Image (cartoon, rainbow, N blue to C red):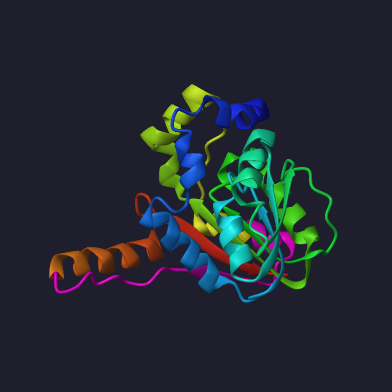
Amino acid sequence: MTKQGETRYPLLFDDKEHFYTEPFGKASDLREFVDIQVMLLHKKGRLLELGAGSGGFSYLFAKCGFEVTSMDISQHMSEIAKNRFAKDGSVKINFITGDMEDISFDKEFEAIVIHDALHHCPNYRLVIANAFKSLKNGGELILAEPSLLHLISPHARKAVKDYTVTELGFSRFQLRRILKKTGFKAVRNFYPGIESYGPNPLIFLANLLKVIFNRFAFFPGEKILIRAVK
């Protein structure tokens, strides 16, 4: 797959309204933001979001008190993000266009977040190495990525066909091994808590099984969440 596919994706995608509403249009997206916010050891400072898309998470991180650099490979996507949020004077966000496989920051950030973007990178090992170099000592990298099941997902296969983008999948073991080999000292898995949804025992049981299943294998639609500290 080509980088050209990644840069042209927002121009070809049918549901362009999604770019202007995410992550506020889906409860699952907001839940993932809350999960990441809970994972972060740093609660302020400089944060870099790589593969930030139309900037929804970057905006929320800024509202939580971070000074945010929001980067995406697509100039069009970065422009959408800037148009959405640049007028809010209460936040500090620097919107830039760039390839996360080719960044040159040097120990500038307390935190780096890659949410649902590493699996679009053919050279994901280089991305992790670049993130390591970009973090200050004691800084943290948060990954939220699809599991190996994404490789056979109809949604992913359709995206490859329609937009010529890269669609990968990962295992926790694979990501942890790469992170440790890169030099990260503390690597931790994160498992979202059980949601009871009131008195319904079947829904509670389904969520309990989801948590247990995720500890040993994969669950469709659930992200792998990992925090790594430099």
The percent coordinates of residue 119 (x first, y second) are 56, 44
- Is residue 71 visible in the rendered image? The answer is yes
- Is residue 1 visible in the rendered image? The answer is no
Residue nearer the viewer, 217 or 222: 222
Residue nearer the viewer, 76 or 125: 76
Residue 111 painted magenta:
no
Residue at 44% across / 59% down in the picture? 30
Residue at 61% across / 56% down in the picture? 58
Please give the range of residues in magenta: 178-200
Say how many tags the image has.
0
The percent coordinates of residue 150 (x first, y second) are 43, 42
The percent coordinates of residue 147 (x first, y second) are 45, 50
Quadrant of residue 105 in the image?
bottom right
Residue nearer the viewer, 224 or 174: 224
Residue at 53% across / 49% down in the picture? 116
Q: Quadrant of the N terminus?
A: top right
Residue at 62% across / 38% down in the picture? 77
The percent coordinates of residue 166 (x first, y second) are 57, 33
Residue 156 lies left or right of residue 141; in this view the side is left
Residue 194 painted magenta:
yes
Q: In this view, does 20 lie above or below 70?
A: above
Residue 56 lies left or right of residue 204; in this view the side is right
Quadrant of residue 69 in the image?
bottom right
Q: In which quarter of the image is the C terminus?
A: bottom right
Quadrant of residue 99 in the image?
top right
Q: Is residue 221 above or below residue 139?
A: above
